[in-house]
Image (cartoon, rainbow, N blue to C red):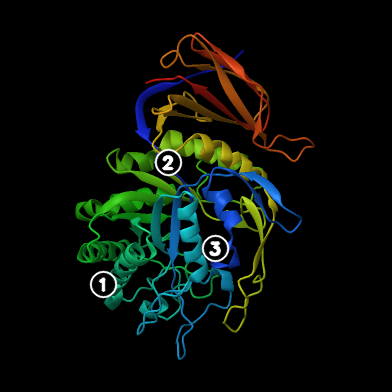
Amino acid sequence: MSDERVIDAQNAYIWDGWGTCLSWWANTELGGRDDLAAALFGLDGVRVGATGGEIELPGLGLNIVRYNLGACTWTDGSAMIESPAIVRRKQIETFCDGDEWDWSADANQRTMLSKARDAGADTFEMFSVSPPWWMTVNGNPSGAEQGDQDNLAFQHQKAFAQFIAVVAKHARDQWKIRFTSVDPFNEPSLNAWHAQQNQEGCHFTRGAQEAVLECLRGALDEQGLDDVLIAASDECHYSSAADTWRNFSEGTRRLIGRVNVHAYERDEDCRSRAKLREAVGEGTPIWQSEYSEGEPDGLSMALSISRDVQHLRPRGWVCWQPVEALDWGLLDGEYDDQTPNPNGGAKGTLKGEVDGVNTKYYVLAHYTRHIRPTMRILQSGHTNTVAAHDATARRLALVTVNDSAQQSVTYNLRQLAEGERIARVWVTDATNAPNARRYAKDTDISLRDGILTLTHDPNTVTTIEIDEVEI
């Protein structure tokens, strides 16, 4: 018996796009690679250099770029304290040491920022993981002595906001990068950010968040950046994001133009996603601004995307590390800085290589290549299917993940399309089996009287694309 999924345009919303963060991979020499910029941010096929030879890949066409505003300096006489657990790749150089500005800092990440723009990215956000070390209580950009302690010194709240605004203005005027949004926090409610942990981080109580947000709006306006919206708070989990939003004052909520949230809560029953959407309401947009896990096949990623779209209704979806080791990346990255210095002063020369490609690169291609910015996300009739419509091209795209046994699915398009027409199909097998399909063009199928039936093999992601569909 076939599972029927009715595609419905009711309550459709506009899609902003797909993206990635530049830290930490672009903090290395990988930030200067044209082939990676073309693969991640372009749509053409590209050959990417890897340790075992070139890999031919479809371009992902990511259009959202999140730039990490760093917190570290190594100037003469610097009093910055470094965590004994951090590695050099995870230390992002900042532009001011408290006395002097250095706009040549953070060269690798800035280089990829420009390459992404030139390859086709068009939406840029700047986010902070920690204030610059000299604004912190203990001089350590990895966090306070205890994870539940705020590490931005109270007297520097306004200076921190002004710092963000000055960099955003400089980027617009000098780098020709217009940050449409800035986010001053990264998982601020976690108790994980302490002086001994292995990356930059900073805890903020909700009161401290509110104070910074108010200062930031004023600082942006003073710099002539009144069109730059504030996103917040990049909480780690959907549930904590809902708690943060509910506990903000009405005045603080009015300062926030978009809610950002990370996807590290699996939330398989989707209750936390739905509660966050309900708390925020439909009037404020949401981005899923960071997703990652160490599973190479892409099934968990595809399921998370589908659950987000159906229950969180975000306008954008962002992966954290596109090039990372231990199957965390879309591409496998190898770096030279895996050993921290127990006495502080992280080792490493920021060298990096691409060692291979994970199946989830091809899985993500189904979504990013066929569900493009400005398309409308439709109701799909099932959590595992994402449906989107391109009004200009008059094209409908359906992307379905099947993590169970083989199943026949009937897509009911009678509200959208009549008559007969051809539907194009692409498939990825999320397995390592011999001859597994990797974003492979499959046999076309026929749509008759608004009904299309397709058998989905186990552990697959499938894209269906149909032309001449108007809403």
Q: Mark 3 points at which residue?
A: 26
Give 377 or 239, whichever is nearer the viewer: 377
Q: Quadrant of residue 211?
A: bottom left
Secondary element at image label 2: helix
Q: Answer left or right for 148 relative to 284.
A: right
Dots 2, 3 in contact, CB < 8 A: no
Q: Please identify, in this view, whether the residue under mark 1 or under mark 2 is nearer the observer.
A: 1
Give the x, y percent position of residue 391.
Answer: 39, 27
Q: Please identify, in this view, whether the residue under mark 1 or under mark 3 is nearer the observer.
A: 3
Name the quadrant of the N terminus. top right
Q: Estimate the spatial distance between the alpha carbons at disc 1 and disc 3, rounded to whole Å.
A: 29 Å
Q: Please identify, in this view, whether the residue under mark 2 or under mark 3 is nearer the observer.
A: 3
Q: Name the residue under label 2.
A: 273
Q: Is residue 385 visible?
A: yes
- Amino acid type, callout 1: Lys
Q: Estimate the spatial distance between the alpha carbons at disc 1 and disc 2, rounded to whole Å.
A: 33 Å
Q: Mark 1 points at which residue?
A: 158
Q: Which residue is drawn at 62% across and 80% down?
A: 341
Give 65 or 6, whichever is nearer the viewer: 65
Give the x, y percent position of residue 425.
Answer: 60, 25
Secondary element at image label 1: helix
Give the x, y percent position of residue 150.
Answer: 37, 71
Q: Estimate the spatial distance between the alpha carbons at disc 2 and disc 3, rounded to whole Å.
A: 30 Å
Q: In which quarter of the image is residue 393?
A: top left
Q: Reading the chain from its start, which is encountered first: label 1 or label 2? A: 1
Q: Reading the chain from its start, which is encountered first: label 2 or label 3? A: 3
Q: Which residue is drawn at 29% across and 43% down?
A: 284
Give 224 or 236, whichever is nearer the viewer: 224
